[in-house]
Amino acid sequence: MPIVGDSVSELCLSASRPFAIVFQDASNEESHLTLEQDILLKRGDVERRVPSYRSNAPFDPSQLSPLLDLLGSMVTDTCAYHDGRLEVTFSCQWSLLVLPIESYEAWRFQYPRPGRPIGGNLAHAQSLGGYEGGLVG
């Protein structure tokens, strides 16, 4: 995923839809990461689970607060594993981990960001998703 060096420019958080993170590169081009599954944030010995809208747990907006630390942070490393896991590490020292799930894509990366730029250059468009057991492009 070509987002190392990009910064988090936008977080899309909802109680009824997937979370999304928008990344922006130095030339202001954007990519989009949709998260359908629970998120695990790790920083040192601290772990925070952020339940997705699909979770059976009651919605608690305070559980979203760790994601706010990502705003403005730069991506320092990323890995989409062959088994469908995704790990993204940020300059704020948080690592985001999404585990795959059997019945649907746990995450989906798209570059450029869907709908932007209108009529823009799609020569280097990329799409990648993770599900239990693999990756899908």
Image (spheres, rainbow, N blue to C red):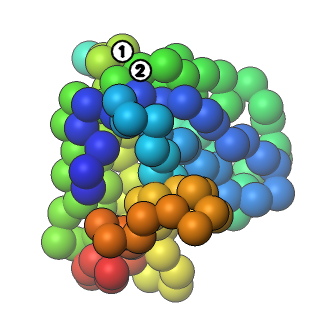
- Ranked by sequence position, the earlier of labels 1 and 2 is 2
Q: Is residue 113 above or below residue 24?
A: below
Which amino acid type is shown beneath numbered disc 2? Ser
User: Can residue 95 be spotted in the picture?
Assistant: no
Q: Quick one: 110 or 112, which is closer to the camera?
A: 112
CB under 8 Å between discs 1 and 2:
yes
Residue drawn at 53 percent across, 43 percent down: 22
Q: Is residue 135 above or below residue 64?
A: below
Q: Position of residue 72 (x, y in %)?
A: 49, 19
Q: Position of residue 10 (x, y in %)?
A: 61, 34
Q: Quick one: 29 or 37, which is closer to the camera?
A: 29
Find residue 101 and report its image quarter: bottom left
Q: Is 130 placed left or right of 68 in the picture?
A: left
The secondary element bearing badge 1 is classed as loop
Which amino acid type is shown beneath numbered disc 1? Cys
Residue drawn at 48 percent across, 75 percent down: 105
The secondary element bearing badge 2 is classed as loop
Q: Quadrant of the C terminus?
A: bottom left
Q: Is residue 51 above or below residue 114?
A: above
Residue picked out by circle 2: 73
Q: Is 45 placed left or right of 65 in the picture?
A: left
Residue drawn at 51 percent across, 62 percent down: 120
- Front disc: 1 or 2: 2
Residue picked out by circle 1: 92
